[in-house]
């Protein structure tokens, strides 16, 4: 399998190594960072040189046409509007693409305009675009598997926490890390103090800022065959009693200011099942650790708890294990809930 790595930051260190370890080949890499353009990807991974250097974004299209990859892995930003150009370039050239962009997991319920444009271009050029990562299993498949062993369901309730330090500055800023509480209220929380009609209008314009669980709830409903009646989102700042150093933000997050946020998304369905999911993303203190907890409430009640998951590695392994599924999927923008369960791939 010939793979191009689009974005050579923290996540790419794992995705590229995992591709090599599973018998794939990295045939190109793309970035906008002048400090890495021209650098051998082996230096980025901390391995021997691979003979593949990082291409500048302005030269990406020519490189992609020259190397003709089977698929591109896009590990850059968290909003579909921010990765639109990268995904559209792949779709235009008929190259399959998978991204760690969290909104891309199910962007049709938060930015249908961009999703439709990508879908049409991918169909035109017979390739597949999708989003995957940690949520594919830990906020998706595990929960639908538990639901499959449940007779009746009243509610699905989930919570997941992660350290924004592990994912780069764009994600940390999107979570309001480093803002004063007043700034957080104006820049982050105020977005959701609107009516359903106002929210839908913003979504239709492609200007909505969803939390990760907004898209996860949509994915879960489609996978479970549920019809969404209404969906709301509420964000609240997270704080800590002491100053915390953030290497990603390059600053000291002062005690009492926002270390990040908690976002709760509540989805009501026509079938009477409620999905309430929360994601907590913040700059961790020495006491914090990643945790993933989901409860399916019904007959019977079942709770799943995973403490200290290796979220970064699990994200990257999920993406790499998805590569064959994406290549064999139908053309268009295809969420992974349509691709069947994610399974371990010994070889690509």
Image (cartoon, rainbow, N blue to C red):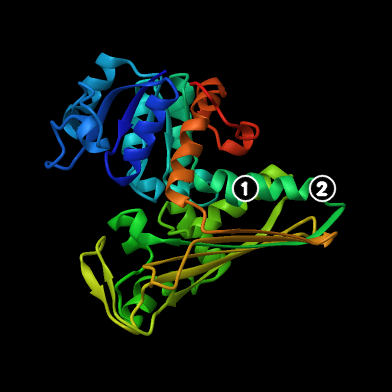
86, above or below 304, in the image: above
Q: Secondary structure at mark 1?
A: helix
Asked if one can make out residue 51 in the rendered structure from this viewpoint, the answer is yes
325, above or below 310, in the image: above
- Residue 63 locus on image (x, y percent): 23, 21
Q: For this view, does 218 lie left or right of residue 190?
A: right
160, above or below 49, in the image: below
Q: Secondary structure at mark 2?
A: loop
Residue located 32% across and 44% down the image: 76
Residue located 65% across and 61% down the image: 230
Q: Quadrant of the N terminus?
A: top left
Earlier in the chain: of badge 1 and badge 2, it is 1
Residue located 68% across and 50% down the image: 143
| Pointer 1 residue | 140
Q: Nearer the viewer, mark 1 or mark 2?
A: 2
Category of crowding for the residue at label 2, using alpha-carbon neighbours closer than 10 angstroms: few (below 14), some (14–19), many (at least 20): few
Asked if one can make out residue 91 in the rendered structure from this viewpoint, the answer is no
Given residues 26 and 169, the one toward you in this image is 26
- Which numbered tag is attached to residue 240? none
- Which numbered tag is attached to residue 149? 2
Residue located 48% across and 52% down the image: 204
Category of crowding for the residue at label 1, using alpha-carbon neighbours closer than 10 angstroms: few (below 14), some (14–19), many (at least 20): many
- Residue 251 locus on image (x, y percent): 21, 70
- Residue 139 locus on image (x, y percent): 59, 52
- Residue 26 locus on image (x, y percent): 32, 23
250, above or below 44, in the image: below
Given residues 317 and 230, the one toward you in this image is 317
Q: Are marks 1 and 2 in contact (CB under 8 Å)?
A: no
């Amino acid at each position: 399998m010939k793979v191009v790595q689009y974005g050579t930051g923290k996540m790419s260190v794992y995705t590229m190594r995992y591709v090599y370890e599973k018998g794939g080949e990295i045939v190109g890499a793309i970035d906008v960072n002048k400090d890495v353009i021209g650098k051998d990807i082996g230096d980025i991974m901390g391995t021997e040189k691979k003979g593949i250097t990082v291409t500048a974004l302005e030269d990406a299209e020519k490189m992609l046409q020259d190397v003709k990859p089977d698929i591109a892995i896009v590990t850059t930003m968290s909003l579909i509007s921010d990765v639109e150009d990268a995904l559209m370039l792949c779709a235009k050239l008929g190259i399959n693409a998978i991204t760690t962009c969290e909104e891309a997991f199910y962007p049709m319920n938060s930015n249908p305009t961009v999703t439709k444009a990508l879908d049409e271009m991918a169909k035109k050029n017979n390739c597949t675009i999708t989003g995957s990562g940690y949520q594919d299993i830990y906020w998706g498949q595990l929960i639908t598997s538990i639901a499959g062993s449940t007779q009746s369901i009243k509610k699905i309730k989930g919570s997941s926490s992660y350290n924004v330090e592990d994912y780069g500055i764009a994600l940390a800023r999107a979570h309001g890390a480093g803002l004063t509480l007043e700034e957080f209220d104006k820049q982050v929380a105020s977005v959701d103090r609107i009516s359903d009609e106002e929210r839908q209008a913003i979504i239709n314009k492609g200007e909505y800022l969803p939390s990760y669980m907004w898209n996860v709830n949509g994915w879960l409903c489609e996978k479970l065959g549920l019809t969404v009646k209404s969906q709301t989102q509420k964000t609240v700042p997270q704080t800590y009693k002491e100053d915390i150093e953030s290497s990603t933000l390059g600053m000291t997050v002062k005690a009492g200011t926002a270390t990040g946020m908690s976002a709760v998304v509540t989805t009501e369905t026509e079938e009477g099942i409620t999905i309430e999911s929360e994601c907590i993303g913040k700059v961790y203190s020495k006491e914090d650790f990643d945790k993933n907890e989901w409860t399916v409430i019904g007959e019977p009640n079942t709770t799943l708890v995973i403490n200290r998951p290796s979220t970064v590695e699990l994200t990257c392994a999920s993406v790499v294990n998805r590569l064959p599924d994406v290549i064999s999927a139908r053309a268009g923008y295809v969420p992974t809930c349509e691709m069947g369960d994610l399974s371990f791939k010994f070889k690509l």
